[in-house]
Amino acid sequence: MLARREHSAHELVQKLSAKGYEREEIETTLGEFKEKNWQSDNRFAESYSRSRLHKGFGPIRIKMELRERGVDASIDNVFEHAPDWQQLLVELHSKKYGNQSPMDMKERAKRTRFFLHKGYSHEMINQLFNSMALKG
């Protein structure tokens, strides 16, 4: 399981439980994996967030997905060296819509929903549209 990609401890517990292993066996095995540094929630969080970042997802969505995978403690460590989220949002906008500002409120609302779904905050999105209005 660990050969293909990193897994969080929470994911491993779920997978092994589904295969019928006892809770005690799972805890022992995970303890051994952590001791030998075969499993690390920090490594998983870094790898996962890097992967999602390259797919255009924002900080809110990535944090939510990491929490779902049981790595609350590692989240802050991952975002210590975070990229410039505003710049990533600008690049995502350019990739999807070019450098054109939304023509009307309906188009702006549509783009806002898209960026919210991707995990960017209202504040970041408004800042993007305001900077586009100043340029154009």
Image (tube, rainbow, N blue to C red):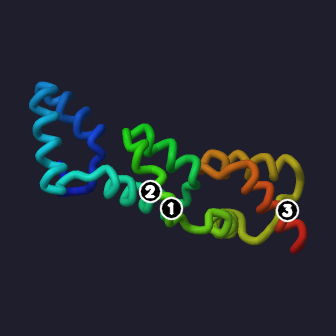
Mark 1 = which residue? 80
Circle on res. 77: 2
Query: Does the image show residue 20?
Result: no
Q: Spatial distance from mark 3 to mark 1, Cα to Cα?
A: 27 Å
Instruction: Identify whether 47 is placed above or below 113.
Output: below
Instruction: Identify whether 39 is placed above or below 55.
Output: above
User: Is tag 2's residue or tag 3's residue first in the polypeptide sequence?
Assistant: 2
Badge 3 local density, few (<14 within 10 Å), some, or many (20+)?
Answer: few
User: Is tag 3's residue or tag 1's residue first in the polypeptide sequence?
Assistant: 1
Mark 3 = which residue? 130
Q: Say which residue appears at 21% left-offset and 56% top-offset.
A: 4
The three-letter amino acid code for the residue at tag 3 is Asn
Q: Nearer the viewer, residue 94 or 67?
A: 67
What secondary structure is found at the residue carrying circle 2? helix
Q: Nearer the viewer, residue 17 or 26?
A: 26
Relative to 97, is 30 on the left or the right?
A: left
Relative to 43, is 77 on the left or the right?
A: right
Q: How far across and down, in percent of the image, does residue 129 sit?
A: 81, 60
Relative to 130, is 50 on the left or the right?
A: left
Query: Does the image show residue 37?
Result: yes
Relative to 96, is 42 on the left or the right?
A: left
Which image quarter: residue 24? top left
